[in-house]
Amino acid sequence: MTTHSLQASALTLSARHGATVANVSAAVARYLLGTTFFVFGLNGFLNFIPPPAEGIPAAAAAFGGALAQTGYMFPLIKGTEVLAGALLLANRWVSLALVLLAPIVVNIIAFHAFLAPGLGIPLVLLVLGSFLAWTRRATFVSLFR
């Protein structure tokens, strides 16, 4: 083998390895985001995760109560979370799922910034969603024309 063919083989191998790392990273992000929204969406209907022991801040409880009082908003939000989470987990219509989840993630961040302090998990959701959107950026081009 010549030096040129060794370099070409190394580039091909690194390109394959890079693509594999990118694909695995996107799959992990998709599973994490999908599982999070699927589980917490189902919890909105089935209430299998207990509320925090330290209680919920008054403003956060008032906001949640207002959503529940509408009779439709809480089921709509949680139903969207279940649907989008299932789409992510099934690797079907991932771009649509990300578009559906974007306003929910923004509201989760605002909720935790203003009503129930603690931005750790909301920022992780933002990073996961942003990373997935970046990996599928070609599908979003028409939204920004």
Image (cartoon, rainbow, N blue to C red):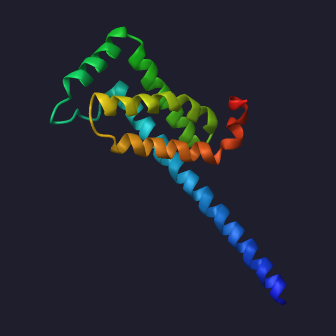
Report if residue 42 is visible in the image.
Answer: no
Q: 3 and 77: which one is in front?
A: 3
Residue 48, image x, y percentages: 29, 33
Reply above or below: 50 against 14.
above
Q: Residue at x 71, y 42 (%)?
A: 138
Q: Residue at x 28, y 16 (%)?
A: 65
Q: Residue furthest left?
A: 54
Q: Residue furthest top?
A: 70
Q: 87 and 4: which one is in front?
A: 4
Q: Quadrant of the C terminus?
A: top right
Q: Quadrant of residue 66?
A: top left
Residue 104, image x, y percentages: 46, 29
Q: Quadrant of residue 99?
A: top right
Reply above or below: 26 against 73.
below
How many marks on residues? Answer: 0
Report if residue 22 is visible in the image.
Answer: yes
Q: Quadrant of the N terminus?
A: bottom right
Is 67 on the left or on the right of 139, as rendered? Answer: left
Q: 137 and 82: which one is in front?
A: 137
Residue 142, image x, y percentages: 73, 31
Q: Residue at x 75, y 72 (%)?
A: 12
Q: Quadrant of residue 47?
A: top left
Residue 74, image x, y percentages: 39, 19
Is 140 on the left or on the right of 72, as rendered? Answer: right
